[in-house]
Image (cartoon, grey):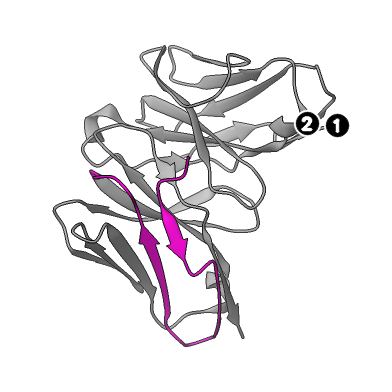
Amino acid sequence: SQQGEEDPQALSIQEGENATMNCSYKTSINNLQWYRQNSGRGLVHLILIRSNEREKHSGRLRVTLDTSKKSSSLLITASRAADTASYFCATDVGANSKLTFGKGITLSVRP
Amino acid sequence: DAGVTQSPTHLIKTRGQQVTLRCSPKSGHDTVSWYQQALGQGPQFIFQYYEEEERQRGNFPDRFSGHQFPNYSSELNVNALLLGDSALYLCASSSIQGASYNEQFFGPGTRLTVL
């Protein structure tokens, strides 16, 4: 079963705009991670946020976590055509435990 | 520093056959997890290996089995293939020493098609 649910399912924006993607989950978590996947290939790790953290930044990426609402958001600023991909959130419930993924968000960035 | 590698890239099999997929973890990693990703879906956890033993298992039948070798590389075996086994199979590696962070790094995947 899928723990996380991303929202929206698909997003289309113009290059240079910001893209915001949301993820909700059902049970308490230890970590939440965001991954990117290009055209059905391997997953690229973007960022990990721990349950006791509220916000993290990495380059053009900003991730927030609200454990009271069981939700996270991924913001990509100044999007580029190369950001076109599927994005997944994944949660775990403890050290070295399995990752549980949502169904993903398809982001299209128009040049 | 090589990342996670998987072989083969693509594989076509017929129903009832058996398949073996291979994974080499990222340098310094000792834990390997396998995931199945059906088209249009998120990856689903199959099982995880550490110290050559299966530590966790997802909701997959016994037709799915695995192995981890002393050099930390791993194999995924699927017996009696069904059409529904067609998917992208992903291997992820992590380090038990970084367990509190549980960052898992994925390989490029093996695309299995069952005809």
Question: Residue B91: within the magenta?
Answer: no
Q: Which amino acid does label 2 sit on?
A: Leu
Count residues near mark 2 (Cα–Cα under 10 Å), then give few for <14, some for 14-19, many for 20+.
Answer: few
Q: Position of residue A76 (x, y in %)?
A: 40, 74
Q: Does the magenta stretch include residue A12?
A: yes
Residue toward you, B76 or B37: B37
Looking at the rendered structure, the kind of residue marked 1 is Leu
Residue A49 lies in what quarter of the image? bottom left
Query: Which stretch is magenta?
Result: A1-30
Quadrant of residue A75 within the rendered picture: bottom left
Query: Against A12, is B59 above or below?
Result: above
Q: In this view, does A43 lie to the left or right of A100?
A: right
Instruction: Indicate which disc residue A81 carries.
Output: none
Is B64 displayed left or right of A23 in the figure? right
Chain for disc number 1: B
Chain letter belonging to callout 2: B
SS for callout 2: helix
Mark 2 to mark 1: distance in Å?
A: 6 Å
Residue B115, numbered circle: 1
Q: Looking at the rendering, in which quadrant would you find the C terminus of chain A?
A: bottom right
Question: What residue is shown with label 2?
Answer: B83
Q: Residue furthest left?
A: A52
Determine if residue B12 is in view.
Answer: yes
